[in-house]
Image (cartoon, rainbow, N blue to C red):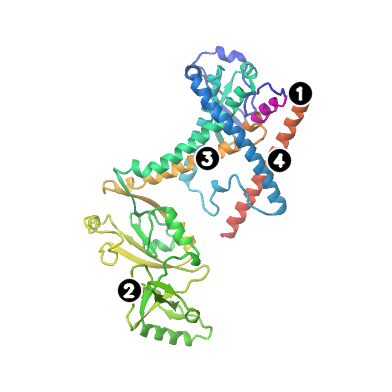
């Protein structure tokens, strides 16, 4: 391996001979083996070279920023690999790199699989065209563009003229090697900006922030008895939910994080009857169909719970209590009559009391009414609004629904149009994470990846090292980087397995 003579970036497959450049511009070729198949295209060679040469001055500045970013990213990720190794040895810390690209405990649907393949192709295309334009701006001739399938993994690559590539100065080589990583980061930034602008872009057709539209309710979900597709979830425990993040945060929050207590004005006669039932139970537990409640006291419109009241438990029928007047929410001032007590359900790990208020805005009876009613202020009087109480594992139920924060303004083709924003968000989310993963992986000092070429070029600046010392340093760096990367991947997969196993 010749140090300081820039190699072809990653991929490991040898370049075709220089005679390929004399093939007809529309020539296509297909090669196949047991584990690798590629489809080479020569049609775009002159187009890409012409565009890169025409904007050479701008592109050199653009890809110089990418080279600086690539160097910083390589340094940071190398430090993170070492830190991750220390976490593995000492059994501290958590796996990084790919933790955020997977969601343990969730199955992958056919839609997720299709979006993953498309996102991979888009991210690889941005990556490879970054290399192509950077090479063209340096005056390098593009030999071909190839689409390949390695085992079952699709991808693409851009082959460059080997002789011209070896004669470039080190920083020009860095611009080419870092261009793919840089374009992947720019693609991530574009996806983020589009996600943030989506409510404005879809404003003429969709209302954002009024609630969460139910797209799908699985039959196994405990909420299937209450919610149906196209229902609009407005509040959870009196808190308005306008995004899926709000939905998850409200349902999975700890008891200590509650801002509003769930209180109901329960008649004293109900409490006394519940105490009689509980007294007859030797275990001190509530009978079947009954749930434990405890008393709340209010002072200055805020809830203050005494230790004595904390210890009292009363057995009541949950569905009957849920229909009573509320007293623990902001604005109600805990105002119960003298013949009532303000009581809240007793929650424990694995069991939550969640009250969900929703509407069915696309029914014939409600289409004309919902436009003139405020979804929050008129919950009790809203003829289209319904509420129910779910008692059980809220964290499991939180992920059982498919929700969208975009409500169509018109009912035309509602069953189809309601899915469009959801698919757009899911596609942008998928492209963002796949492109970020591709950028991170190619920054690593690993054999056959861009990080290997970047590390080789960096060694050219160490002029005090002999050629043999540079070759040894490169081999050691790639061996260590590849080994640490493999250890990190194994650790991540093991952590994902443990999380998935614990949720069974």
For label 4, the crowd category at 10 Å Cα-Cα, with few meaning under 14, some 14 to 19 and many 20 or more, is some
Where residue 477 appears, as percent x and y from the top left, is 72, 34
Determine which of the numbered discs, if any, sits on residue 50 in the image.
Answer: none
For label 1, the crowd category at 10 Å Cα-Cα, with few meaning under 14, some 14 to 19 and many 20 or more, is some
Q: Give the residue at mark 2.
A: 325
Establish if 109 lies above or below 235.
Answer: above
Name the residue located 46 percent from the left edge and 76 percent from the top edge. 305
- Tell me whether circle 1 and circle 4 mark residues in contact (CB < 8 Å): no
> Marks 2/3: CA distance?
49 Å
Report the side of 57 relative to 383 (left or right).
Answer: right
**Circle 2 SS class:** loop
Where residue 452 appears, as percent x and y from the top left, is 66, 31
Residue 371 picture quarter: bottom left
Establish if 303 lies above or below 372.
Answer: below
Where residue 271 appears, as percent x and y from the top left, is 40, 83
> Marks 4/3: CA distance?
23 Å
Q: Give the residue at mark 3.
A: 434
- Tell me whether circle 4 and circle 2 mark residues in contact (CB < 8 Å): no
Q: Give the residue at mark 4.
A: 483
**Foreground: disc 1 or disc 4:** 1
Q: Going from the N terminus, do you reach mark 1 or mark 2 first?
A: 2
Q: Going from the N terminus, do you reach mark 4 or mark 2 first?
A: 2
Q: Residue furthest left?
A: 368
Q: Which residue lies furthest to the front in this view?
A: 300
Q: Give the residue at mark 1.
A: 467
């Amino acid at each position: 391996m010749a140090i300081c003579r820039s190699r072809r970036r990653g991929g490991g497959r040898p370049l075709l001979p220089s005679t390929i450049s004399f093939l007809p511009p529309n020539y296509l070729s297909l090669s196949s083996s047991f584990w690798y198949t590629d489809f080479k295209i020569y049609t775009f060679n002159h187009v890409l070279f012409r565009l890169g040469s025409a904007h050479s001055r701008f592109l050199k500045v653009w890809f110089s920023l990418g080279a600086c970013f690539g160097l910083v990213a390589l340094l940071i990720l190398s430090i993170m690999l070492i830190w991750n190794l220390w976490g593995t040895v000492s059994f501290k810390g958590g796996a990084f790199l790919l933790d955020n690209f997977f969601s343990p405990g969730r199955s992958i649907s056919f839609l997720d699989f299709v979006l993953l393949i498309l996102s991979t192709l888009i991210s690889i295309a941005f990556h490879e065209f970054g290399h192509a334009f950077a090479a063209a701006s340096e005056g390098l001739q593009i030999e071909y563009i190839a689409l390949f399938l390695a085992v079952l993994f699709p991808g693409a690559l851009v082959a460059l003229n080997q002789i011209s590539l070896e004669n470039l100065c080190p920083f020009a080589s860095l611009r080419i090697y870092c261009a793919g990583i840089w374009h992947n980061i720019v693609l991530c930034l574009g996806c983020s900006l589009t996600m943030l602008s989506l409510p404005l872009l879809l404003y003429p057709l969709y209302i954002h922030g009024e609630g969460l539209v139910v797209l799908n309710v699985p039959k196994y979900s405990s909420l299937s008895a209450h919610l149906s597709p196209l229902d609009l979830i407005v509040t959870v425990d009196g808190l308005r939910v306008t995004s899926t993040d709000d939905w998850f945060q409200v349902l999975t929050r700890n008891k200590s994080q509650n801002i509003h207590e769930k209180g109901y004005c329960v008649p004293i006669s109900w409490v006394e009857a519940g105490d009689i039932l509980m007294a007859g139970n030797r275990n001190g537990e509530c009978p079947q169909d009954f749930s434990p409640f405890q008393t709340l006291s209010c002072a200055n419109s805020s809830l203050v719970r005494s230790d004595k009241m904390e210890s009292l438990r009363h057995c009541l029928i949950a569905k009957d209590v849920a229909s009573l007047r509320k007293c623990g929410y902001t604005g109600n001032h805990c105002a119960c009559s003298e013949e009532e007590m303000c009581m809240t359900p007793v929650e424990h790990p694995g069991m939550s009391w969640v009250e969900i208020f929703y509407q069915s805005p696309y029914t014939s009876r409600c289409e004309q009414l919902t436009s003139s009613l405020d979804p929050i202020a008129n919950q009790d009087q809203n003829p289209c609004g319904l509420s129910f109480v779910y008692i059980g594992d809220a964290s499991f139920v939180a992920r059982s629904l498919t929700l969208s924060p975009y409500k169509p303004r018109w009912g035309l083709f509602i069953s189809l149009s309601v899915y469009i924003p959801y698919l757009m968000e899911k596609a942008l989310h998928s492209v963002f994470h796949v492109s970020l993963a591709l950028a991170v992986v190619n920054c690593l000092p690993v054999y056959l990846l861009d990080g290997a070429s970047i590390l080789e070029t960096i060694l050219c600046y160490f002029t005090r090292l002999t050629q043999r010392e540079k070759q040894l340093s490169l081999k050691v760096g790639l061996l260590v980087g590849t080994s640490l990367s493999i250890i990190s991947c194994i650790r991540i997969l093991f952590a994902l397995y443990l999380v998935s196993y614990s949720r069974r």
